[in-house]
Structure formats: C-alpha cells, structure tokens
Image (spheres, coloured by chain):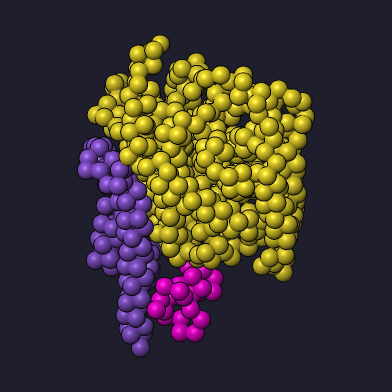
Amino acid sequence: MATPARYRLSAGAMVAVTILLVIPILALVIVPIYARKSPELWGFPFFYWYQLLWVLLCGFFTWGAHLVIQRDRRTTGRDRAEVQR
Amino acid sequence: MSGHPVELAAGTKVDGTALGVLIFFFLVVSVGGFWAARWRRADSPHSLDEWGLGGRSFGTVITWFLLGGDLYTAYTFIAVPAAMFATGAVSGYFAVAYTILVYPIIFIFMPRMWSVAHRNGYVTAADFIRGRFDSKTLALAVAITGILATMPYIALQLVGIQAIIDTIGIGGKGNAFVRDLPLLIAFAVLAAYTYSSGLRAPALIAFVKDTLIYLVIAVAIIYVGVHTGFHHLFNAAQTKMATKNPKTHAATGVFVPAKNNYWAYATLAFGSALALFMYPHSMTAVLSGRSRNVIRRNAAILPTYSLMLGLLALLGYAAIAEKTSVVGTDGKPNPQLAVPHFFRDQFPHWFAGVAYSAIAIGALVPAAIMSIAAANLFTRNIYREFIAPGATPKQEATVSKITSLVVKFGALIFVLSLDKQNAINLQLLGGVWILQTFVSVVGGLYSRWLHRWALLAGWAVGMVYGTVAAYHQKSAATKHFGGSLATFPYTHTKMYIAFSALVLNIVVAVVLTLVLRAVRAPAGRDQTTDDDYYAESDLAGDTLPGTEGGLPAPGAATSRT
C-alpha cells in the first residue's frame, strides 16, 4: 500500500529536520572535538562544560525539529483542503 | 580512602532525623500510589491497556515526569557519581553525552513506534515484532531479552535503596533480618500499590520524586560552587585520576579522554543511547503517551533531566574534593556510597534525609514501571502466545498483575541472597543484550527487507558474542565482567561491547537476508500497513492537526499558538 501523500513531509522540511537532528549527534559522537581541558569556564574544563551546554542546545535543536514538522503539516494540510475545495 | 574502617563502622549510629524524613516521604508516596488507582480512572479498568499503559492517555507533562522518573533511576543517581568518584570520565561522565544523544534518536523513530502500536493495540515491542515479521520465535526472543535485561535492573534499584539504608546507619554486622526489614517493607508496599493502580501509581509518584531530585541537586550544586569551588573540585579529581595504582602502575582513571579512548567514549555514549529505548520500561512509558506529539515534545524537554544528571555526576568529584569516606557500615569501602555519604557529611541531617528520600523514591518509580513492563511482556508474548491463546483482556490484566508481583519478589530475593556484584554484572550484560533487539525493532519500523530468520540469527550472534566478551573482562575488583569495554574483534581499539555486538548482529542479519532472499525463504505476512506508521491519536482521527476544523488534536493544542 502506498503511503498517502498527506503524511509525507515536504522535501525542505525533511532536510531541515535531518540537519537539526544530526548536528547534536555529531557534536557528541566526535569526541576529539571536545576532549580537551581549555578553555575553562567558571572552573569547568572544556570537556565538562561543552557537554552540559549541549544538553540545552540539543533540547533547542530537537524542539526546532518538532516545530518544523508541525508547520509543515499545517501548510500541507491547508494545501490539501484547498485542493478539495 | 581506606583509612580506619573498623573504627568508622563501630562509630556508626542510626541517624534518627534523616530516617524520620525518609519515612515521611515514603508514607506520602505510598498514599499517592494507592490513590492513583482512582486518578484519571477509566470506565473499564480491567485490561492491559488500562493497568499496563495507564489507558494510553498521558499528555506531555505527565509523560515528562513518567519518562524522567523511569529513565533516570536511583541506580543512575548512585552509580554515575560512583563511577566518577572511582575512575572518572570514561566510566561516568559518558552518561551525559549518552542521555543527550538519546533524544534526537528517539525523535526519529519513536513516533513511528507509537503510531503502529496505537493502531494495532501493541503493548510491547515484541507485540510489534510478532505482527510485523509474523514470527513467534523472533517475538519470543525479543520478549525474553527484554525480561532478562529488566530483572537485574530492578534488582539494582534495590541496591540503590540499600546504599541509603546503610548510610542512615541501619546495617553492618547486626541481625540480617533487621538490616533487610526496611527493604522488605518498602518493596511490599510498592508491590501492593503497583498491583492495584498499575502504571498510574509510578506516574503519580514520579511528581514527588522529580520535585525532590531537582530541589536536592540545585541545593547541592550551589553548595559545591560556593563551598568547594569548581576549580578545587576539578583539580582534586584530576589529581586523583592521574595518581598511579601502586600495584598495577596504571592511572586510577581518566579525567579527559585521550586518543586511546575516544572510541570507547563515543561507543559507550552512542551504544547506550540506542539501547535505552529498547528497554521494556522505556517502551511502556512511551506507549502510554496519548499522541505522537507528546513523544516529539518530550524528546525536546527531557534533556532537562540530563542536565541534572550531569550536575549529579559532578558530585562524585565533589566527594573526591571533600575527601568523603566511602566506607560502609560493614567496614568495606564502596564507591556507591560516595553520594549518600557526601550528603551525610556536608549537610544538616534533615536535608540529608530529603536527599536520601529523593534517591529512595527514585528507586520505587522505575522499579514499578520495570515490573509492569516485564509483566506485560510475559503476558502478551509468552502467556497469550504459548499458554492461553484465547485470553480475554481481563485475564491478561490479571496475569500481568500477578507477574508484576513475581518479578519484584524475584528481584528482592536476588538482591538479598546473592552478592550485589552479581546484580551489577547482570545489569552490564542487560545493556549488551537489550541492544541486540535494536535491529529487529527499529529496522522493522522502517522496512521488512531484513528477513525474520536472519534477524533471529543476528540477534543470537550478538547475544553470544556480547556475553562472552563481557565475561572475559577483568578488573581490579572482579575476574569476570570487569567492565563494559573490550577490543573490537581483529583490532586493538577498545569499544563498548554492546556496540561491537550490534555491529556483528547487523552484519550477520544483512548477509543472511541476502542468502534467504536468494533461496526465497518464506517471509511471513505483515499485519501492519504503511498507514499505521503515521497514525495520529484517535481524537484527531486520521486527519491532520489543523484540518479537522472542530476539535484540535489533543497533543497538538498547546504548541499551536
């Protein structure tokens, strides 16, 4: 059974969501980026504060991906409604 | 650290104030646990959907507390700082990277899992495998792996409570019955309200647990910043990790990973992130959400817990800087006491009591969800599949309730009768095992290309390799199961065993699929449709949020402003 078109994300949204989700993954999987002591922040070596910072950033990126999907669904939904009219 | 353990042990008294605070919070959550049966009560509470998934009705906020309470367990709170205290970043701090990585990953595939489960009434991952691949054997493999991986995890929650009880001063060489009595009472009460309230009980208790945890961590980290100072904290940790062990001449631990353990750190974080949502208790919490959006939104807001976990991990270093003694009432040093003892030594009794309560309640929430999840697996994929195929929803719920009791008491007997090292070993293996179901479950969400028999073979190879590799790891403390890292086959690079096993698992599955497809082995009938993987919640029907005109989709309402 073919996937109904209404469920598909638009190509642009798909690209945006992929980028938003892949960046945090790469930022943490590539350990050499952050396995260092300096620069320090409030006494925290870089290795430690970088990862804590990514906790917050990752939340923002994931929320961004969520918003992109919501928006895309609304616009494609409207398109569909107009076609039906 | 080893100091004069006997004197310390002899000087231990029961901390009455802390014990009082702990009992108070325990009573609060017990009342809440029983009352939860009435909370958001359904018309027909006698089904697995109601008892085991809370009616699949939880919104963003409840799911956030439930998943947070479920994934960040008492054992995590004890074990991550303990690992930091003992050997530093690679064994401890990777948990921060791991619990960040997990969210973009689940954002990708968990909504599909939710949809297909919602459409077809699946309660467990094995239900999905059964429907998707039409294979009782593969579903059984996934179910048994889930139960095996969950049992020691429940046992470790008890180990977390034991660390607290020991710190309060009940324990030591006294009467074994008196020592274990608090644990028995706590678990009997937990078992009783889980039995009567199902998933609603941990969902409600999670509010108390998380409020306490956030409060305790906020206070602790401000205290550490002002009193200990972060410079001093990291310097003390760095010095300890660089100190060479007089016997082995190896450094105590790792402060910042160097070239030789980049792969170890990355595979530990990534492998654990892939594994986390394969655990039955994570799946249960996700499936209890009421819409796809609840899951996506939670993927974005759950990292707040990771921030807390990261700060908590640093308390392991704070214990180093403050020269906290980790000698237990039995007179033996035990790094798992680092955090409880840190609170005991640095804070007034009543606040230490609040911290102990946060950790102990932090054990009850996941233990309840885990036992429910294991019981659901048994009921759906063993009992209904092989023992009583015609079971009614009411019979399913009854079997599941009884199984949840059996599972909890099994874990209790395990912890009380065996050395707790066994529980830790099995938990390590559990992580290795559960990741081997990833290929079937997540692969299955996207395609049926991989053949069911090839998946079964890949699973078996991953399980055997992972178990053998873990068995052969030595450490200063144990001859076997000494750590979660091993050299990847035919290389000198150390990697997380679960990850290496997953790679072998995938290779076997792909190669055998090519063979089986060439000989046209029967692939079975798919009971799901492509449509199922995109289904929204019932109220929204199959229309898109925003197009249905009248009622907005329940999950979509808040973000659409």
Letter of the yellow chain: B
- Location of residue B517 by image quarter: top left
- Report the side of B392 relative to B92 (left or right): right
Residue B74 shows in the view: yes
Start-end of magenta stretch? B532-561
Percent of width and height locating residue B375: 66, 45
**Quarter occupied by residue A12:** bottom left
Q: Is residue B372 left or right of residue B247?
A: right
Q: Residue at x 57, y 38 (%)?
A: B344
Magenta segment includes B347: no
Is residue A68 shown above or below B327? below
Q: Residue B377, can we see it?
A: no
Q: Nearer the viewer, residue B29 or B289?
A: B29
Identify by letter the chain in purple.
A
Q: Is residue B540 magenta?
A: yes
Residue lying at 33% horizontally and 73% vertically, measured from the top left:
A71
* Residue B172 point in image, percent of width and height: 68, 25
